[in-house]
Image (cartoon, rainbow, N blue to C red):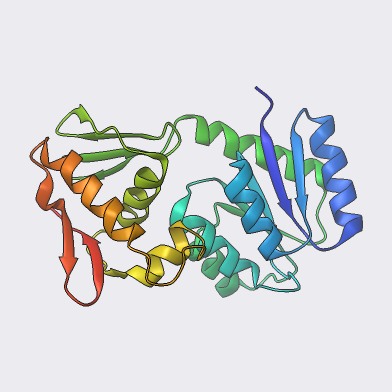
Amino acid sequence: MEQRILLIEDNPDITRVVQYELEQAGYRVLAAPDGVTGLTSARESSPDLVILDLGLPDFDGAEIARRLRKTSSVPIIILTAMDAVDRKVNLLEAGADDYMTKPFHPEELVARVKVQLRHQQHGEVISIGPLEIHPQKRLCHYNGHEVRLSPKEFDLLTFLARQPGRVYSRQEIEREVWNGELPSNSNVVDVHMANMRAKLRDLDGYGIIRTVRGIGYALKTP
Protein backbone atom coordinates (compact mmCIF):
# COMPACT_ATOMS: atom_id res chain seq x y z
CA MET A 1 0.00 0.00 0.00
CA GLU A 2 1.26 3.49 -0.88
CA GLN A 3 2.72 5.20 2.18
CA ARG A 4 1.41 8.67 3.00
CA ILE A 5 3.65 11.57 3.99
CA LEU A 6 2.11 14.68 5.56
CA LEU A 7 4.15 17.80 4.78
CA ILE A 8 3.31 20.78 7.02
CA GLU A 9 5.14 23.69 5.40
CA ASP A 10 4.07 27.27 4.63
CA ASN A 11 6.70 27.98 1.96
CA PRO A 12 5.16 26.98 -1.40
CA ASP A 13 8.56 26.65 -3.09
CA ILE A 14 9.84 24.20 -0.49
CA THR A 15 6.51 22.35 -0.58
CA ARG A 16 6.69 21.97 -4.33
CA VAL A 17 10.28 20.64 -4.33
CA VAL A 18 9.82 18.26 -1.40
CA GLN A 19 6.51 16.98 -2.75
CA TYR A 20 8.07 16.28 -6.14
CA GLU A 21 11.05 14.40 -4.67
CA LEU A 22 8.87 12.30 -2.36
CA GLU A 23 6.39 11.45 -5.11
CA GLN A 24 9.29 10.44 -7.35
CA ALA A 25 10.36 8.09 -4.55
CA GLY A 26 6.92 6.48 -4.57
CA TYR A 27 5.18 8.20 -1.68
CA ARG A 28 1.83 9.94 -1.59
CA VAL A 29 2.22 13.48 -0.24
CA LEU A 30 -0.44 15.47 1.62
CA ALA A 31 0.47 19.15 1.98
CA ALA A 32 -0.73 21.54 4.70
CA PRO A 33 0.27 25.26 4.80
CA ASP A 34 -0.19 25.78 8.55
CA GLY A 35 -0.41 24.01 11.89
CA VAL A 36 -4.20 23.88 12.22
CA THR A 37 -4.62 22.38 8.76
CA GLY A 38 -1.77 19.98 9.50
CA LEU A 39 -3.30 18.73 12.74
CA THR A 40 -6.65 18.23 11.02
CA SER A 41 -5.03 16.35 8.15
CA ALA A 42 -3.03 14.18 10.59
CA ARG A 43 -6.22 13.26 12.42
CA GLU A 44 -8.23 12.50 9.28
CA SER A 45 -5.62 10.82 7.08
CA SER A 46 -3.39 8.96 9.62
CA PRO A 47 -0.13 9.56 7.70
CA ASP A 48 2.81 7.19 7.95
CA LEU A 49 5.23 10.09 8.57
CA VAL A 50 5.06 13.85 9.16
CA ILE A 51 7.54 16.43 7.85
CA LEU A 52 7.03 19.56 9.92
CA ASP A 53 8.37 23.07 9.37
CA LEU A 54 9.34 24.83 12.58
CA GLY A 55 8.35 28.35 11.49
CA LEU A 56 4.64 28.05 10.76
CA PRO A 57 2.40 31.14 10.54
CA ASP A 58 -0.02 30.07 13.28
CA PHE A 59 1.82 27.70 15.66
CA ASP A 60 5.41 26.98 16.55
CA GLY A 61 6.38 23.66 14.97
CA ALA A 62 7.53 22.28 18.31
CA GLU A 63 4.02 22.80 19.71
CA ILE A 64 2.53 20.94 16.74
CA ALA A 65 4.98 18.10 17.40
CA ARG A 66 3.91 17.95 21.04
CA ARG A 67 0.25 17.83 20.07
CA LEU A 68 0.84 15.10 17.51
CA ARG A 69 2.88 13.08 19.97
CA LYS A 70 0.15 13.08 22.61
CA THR A 71 -2.06 10.82 20.52
CA SER A 72 0.23 9.35 17.86
CA SER A 73 3.62 7.72 17.48
CA VAL A 74 3.92 8.74 13.82
CA PRO A 75 7.55 9.57 12.92
CA ILE A 76 8.16 13.32 12.81
CA ILE A 77 10.99 15.00 10.89
CA ILE A 78 11.31 18.72 11.64
CA LEU A 79 12.68 21.29 9.21
CA THR A 80 14.35 24.19 10.96
CA ALA A 81 16.49 27.20 10.08
CA MET A 82 18.01 27.14 13.58
CA ASP A 83 21.23 25.24 14.15
CA ALA A 84 21.72 25.77 17.90
CA VAL A 85 22.34 22.57 19.87
CA ASP A 86 19.93 23.45 22.68
CA ARG A 87 17.17 24.13 20.14
CA LYS A 88 17.74 20.73 18.55
CA VAL A 89 17.57 19.07 21.95
CA ASN A 90 14.27 20.84 22.64
CA LEU A 91 12.87 19.58 19.33
CA LEU A 92 13.75 15.99 20.17
CA GLU A 93 12.23 16.39 23.62
CA ALA A 94 9.06 17.75 21.99
CA GLY A 95 8.67 14.45 20.14
CA ALA A 96 10.64 14.85 16.92
CA ASP A 97 12.39 11.73 15.63
CA ASP A 98 14.79 13.65 13.40
CA TYR A 99 15.46 17.17 12.13
CA MET A 100 17.09 18.85 9.15
CA THR A 101 18.56 22.32 9.07
CA LYS A 102 17.62 24.60 6.16
CA PRO A 103 18.87 24.82 3.51
CA PHE A 104 18.91 21.08 2.88
CA HIS A 105 19.21 18.70 -0.06
CA PRO A 106 15.84 17.11 -0.92
CA GLU A 107 17.62 13.82 -1.67
CA GLU A 108 18.90 13.68 1.91
CA LEU A 109 15.41 14.36 3.24
CA VAL A 110 14.05 11.46 1.18
CA ALA A 111 16.80 9.22 2.58
CA ARG A 112 15.89 10.19 6.14
CA VAL A 113 12.22 9.54 5.42
CA LYS A 114 13.11 6.03 4.30
CA VAL A 115 15.13 5.42 7.47
CA GLN A 116 12.29 6.55 9.75
CA LEU A 117 9.74 4.43 7.90
CA ARG A 118 11.99 1.38 8.19
CA HIS A 119 12.23 1.93 11.93
CA GLN A 120 8.47 2.38 12.13
CA GLN A 121 7.84 -1.02 10.56
CA HIS A 122 9.12 -2.68 13.73
CA GLY A 123 6.27 -1.01 15.61
CA GLU A 124 6.13 0.83 18.92
CA VAL A 125 4.87 -1.00 22.00
CA ILE A 126 3.70 0.81 25.15
CA SER A 127 4.03 -1.51 28.15
CA ILE A 128 2.71 -0.62 31.61
CA GLY A 129 2.72 -3.68 33.83
CA PRO A 130 0.27 -6.19 32.31
CA LEU A 131 -1.07 -3.56 29.86
CA GLU A 132 0.41 -3.62 26.36
CA ILE A 133 -0.59 -1.21 23.59
CA HIS A 134 0.50 -1.43 19.95
CA PRO A 135 -0.35 2.03 18.48
CA GLN A 136 0.48 1.15 14.86
CA LYS A 137 -1.51 -2.09 14.90
CA ARG A 138 -4.18 -0.49 17.11
CA LEU A 139 -4.15 -3.51 19.39
CA CYS A 140 -4.40 -3.60 23.17
CA HIS A 141 -3.70 -6.56 25.49
CA TYR A 142 -4.09 -6.96 29.23
CA ASN A 143 -2.59 -10.01 30.95
CA GLY A 144 -2.03 -11.47 27.50
CA HIS A 145 -5.68 -11.14 26.46
CA GLU A 146 -6.90 -8.77 23.77
CA VAL A 147 -8.98 -5.83 24.99
CA ARG A 148 -11.56 -5.04 22.31
CA LEU A 149 -11.78 -1.25 22.33
CA SER A 150 -13.70 1.14 20.12
CA PRO A 151 -11.53 3.56 18.07
CA LYS A 152 -12.05 6.42 20.54
CA GLU A 153 -11.52 4.14 23.55
CA PHE A 154 -8.22 3.05 22.01
CA ASP A 155 -7.18 6.67 21.37
CA LEU A 156 -8.13 7.60 24.92
CA LEU A 157 -6.26 4.73 26.56
CA THR A 158 -3.19 5.36 24.41
CA PHE A 159 -3.27 9.05 25.34
CA LEU A 160 -3.28 8.20 29.07
CA ALA A 161 -0.64 5.50 28.63
CA ARG A 162 1.93 7.83 27.08
CA GLN A 163 2.37 9.51 30.48
CA PRO A 164 1.19 7.01 33.10
CA GLY A 165 0.55 8.54 36.51
CA ARG A 166 -0.15 12.00 35.14
CA VAL A 167 -3.65 13.27 35.93
CA TYR A 168 -5.50 14.70 32.92
CA SER A 169 -8.53 16.93 33.33
CA ARG A 170 -11.66 16.24 31.30
CA GLN A 171 -10.95 19.42 29.38
CA GLU A 172 -7.47 18.22 28.41
CA ILE A 173 -8.84 14.86 27.32
CA GLU A 174 -11.62 16.48 25.30
CA ARG A 175 -9.14 18.81 23.62
CA GLU A 176 -6.58 16.15 22.73
CA VAL A 177 -8.73 13.08 21.98
CA TRP A 178 -11.85 14.79 20.61
CA ASN A 179 -10.04 17.90 19.34
CA GLY A 180 -12.24 20.13 21.47
CA GLU A 181 -15.32 19.25 19.41
CA LEU A 182 -17.55 18.00 22.24
CA PRO A 183 -20.44 20.20 23.38
CA SER A 184 -20.23 21.84 26.80
CA ASN A 185 -21.34 19.70 29.75
CA SER A 186 -20.87 16.55 27.66
CA ASN A 187 -20.41 13.27 29.56
CA VAL A 188 -18.77 11.51 26.61
CA VAL A 189 -15.40 11.26 28.39
CA ASP A 190 -16.98 9.67 31.48
CA VAL A 191 -18.97 7.22 29.35
CA HIS A 192 -15.85 6.11 27.48
CA MET A 193 -13.95 5.73 30.75
CA ALA A 194 -16.74 3.58 32.18
CA ASN A 195 -16.79 1.40 29.07
CA MET A 196 -13.01 0.91 29.17
CA ARG A 197 -13.12 0.06 32.86
CA ALA A 198 -15.80 -2.56 32.25
CA LYS A 199 -13.72 -4.19 29.51
CA LEU A 200 -10.55 -4.12 31.61
CA ARG A 201 -12.44 -5.35 34.69
CA ASP A 202 -13.32 -8.54 32.83
CA LEU A 203 -9.55 -9.16 32.58
CA ASP A 204 -8.85 -8.23 36.24
CA GLY A 205 -7.70 -4.76 35.24
CA TYR A 206 -10.44 -2.51 36.60
CA GLY A 207 -8.19 -0.49 38.91
CA ILE A 208 -5.71 0.54 36.23
CA ILE A 209 -7.70 3.71 35.46
CA ARG A 210 -7.74 6.08 38.42
CA THR A 211 -10.31 8.81 38.99
CA VAL A 212 -9.06 11.90 40.79
CA ARG A 213 -12.20 13.50 42.14
CA GLY A 214 -12.80 17.00 40.89
CA ILE A 215 -9.80 16.86 38.54
CA GLY A 216 -9.84 14.03 36.01
CA TYR A 217 -8.26 10.68 35.19
CA ALA A 218 -4.89 8.97 35.22
CA LEU A 219 -3.47 5.60 34.30
CA LYS A 220 -1.95 3.89 37.32
CA THR A 221 1.71 2.98 37.23
CA PRO A 222 2.73 -0.57 38.25
Which residue is found at the position 16% from the left and 74% from the top? 213
Q: Position of residue 169 (x, y in %)?
A: 32, 71
Q: Is residue 99 visible?
A: no
Q: Nearer the viewer, residue 22 or 155?
A: 155
Q: Residue at x 34, y 55 (%)?
A: 162
Q: Is residue 36 above or below residue 204?
A: below
For residue 147, say whether it is visible. Answer: yes
Q: Residue 9 vs residue 5: left or right?
A: right
Q: Which quarter of the figure has residue 70?
A: bottom left
Q: Residue 187: where, in percent of width, then height?
A: 32, 62
- Choose top left, top right, bottom left or bottom right for residue 210: bottom left
- Could you say which is closer to the camera, residue 171 or residue 140? 171
Give how far across and how far down residue 92 sits, in percent.
Answer: 52, 61
- Residue farthest toward the bottom in the current orientation of the protein: 214
Q: Residue at x 82, y 34 (%)?
A: 23
Asked whether 164 or 140 is in front, the reply is 140
Q: Position of residue 28 (x, y in %)?
A: 75, 34
**Is residue 109 depicted above or below 80 in this figure?**
above
Question: Residue placed at 58% from the left, 49% from the top?
Answer: 43
Q: Which sits in the foreground, 122 or 181?
A: 181
Which quarter of the image is occupied by the N terminus?
top right
